[in-house]
Image (cartoon, helix red, strand yellow):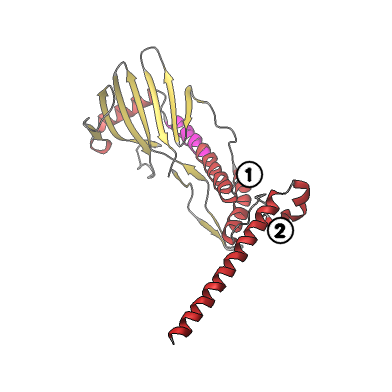
Amino acid sequence: MSALMNATKKLVGLSGAFRNVLNKREFTRTLWIMSKTPETSSNLQHSIGCSCGCGAKHMHTKGERELVEFLTEEILAERKAQKIKTIPTEVDGFKVKLDGAEVELSKQSANEKIVISFNVNHTVDTEAETEVDPQNDKADFGEMKSKPQFEVDIVRGSTTLSLTCSFLNEPAQEGEYNDVFGIDEMTIFNGEWNDKIYAVAGDVLDGYLYDLLMNLLEEKGVSNEFVEKLSDLSTAYEHSSYIGLLEGLSKFTTGN
């Protein structure tokens, strides 16, 4: 029995070695084909290249091909849906600065500087409630709007009054002013901000003080109308960033 097992192992080993030789030869042949001049290998390009239309010189998995095909259509659809093709460089006198997902708007006067900053990540939601058309069973998700939380820093010398603001989702009660945004937090500090600096939440501020701070923001140009434009800017930039992400994923998948 031991002799028979040893003979079997030898046969298996020889079979495995033979397969390895075949695999190596097949790989060498592939390298030889790819090393030929374009004139020689042009007729073989279709057989060794990807069939999904990406132009890549290597075969893709089924999942990669399906992903590339989807991304090609999705990018075209998203570009078609873009309302603002070019991000503005200025909004109501505030200069716009873009850095990745970060956006900064700034305005300088004789004695102070106003800086508004926000991040477009995770800021998009549907503007209207989802509705389903019974005729075609397709959902209408409404317009996608970016409504980021944003910081308003009023800087005078080395002192900064900082107000954290966000969009209001709930409609105003009867008799109340219909503000588009509200104050979440207020703090004031010298030099650079750090975790030791005290801050107070907007919902525990004295009501009259809160209204005065909202009036101050409006005087500085941060009005309801401006914040609506800020949302438009954020929506356009978030959308262009999303398209850039899809394009980056497509290039990564194709290997280009």
Q: Measuring 27% from the left and 36% from the top, which residue is drawn there?
A: 202
Q: Is residue 225 magenta?
A: yes
Instruction: Tell me the kind of residue under disc 1.
Output: Lys
Element assignment for label 2:
helix
Observer able to see residue 51: no
Query: What's the distance in space between the residues labelled 2 and 1, CA to CA?
Result: 34 Å
Instruction: Tell me the kind of residue under disc 2.
Output: Ser
Q: Residue furthest front?
A: 3
Residue 103 picture location, percent across and down: 45, 32
Please give the residue where the numbered disc 2 appears in the rendered image.
47
Disc 2 or 1, which lies upstream in sequence? 2
Element assignment for label 1:
helix
The answer to whether residue 200 is left or right of residue 106 is left
| Viewer-nearest residue: 18 or 227 | 18
Q: In which quarter of the image is the N terminus?
A: bottom left
**Magenta range:** 224-236
The answer to whether residue 244 is left or right of residue 45 is left
| Viewer-nearest residue: 224 or 91 | 91
Residue 254 picture location, percent across and down: 60, 50
Q: Measuring 38% from the left and 22% from the top, which residue is drawn there?
A: 114
Between disc 2 and disc 1, the foreground one is 2
Please give the residue where the numbered disc 1 appears in the rendered image.
80
Do residues under tags 2 and 1 come within 8 Å of each other at their CB atoms? no
Give the answer, above or below, for where 4 lies relative to 32. Answer: below
Where residue 185 sits, quadrant-wise, is: top left
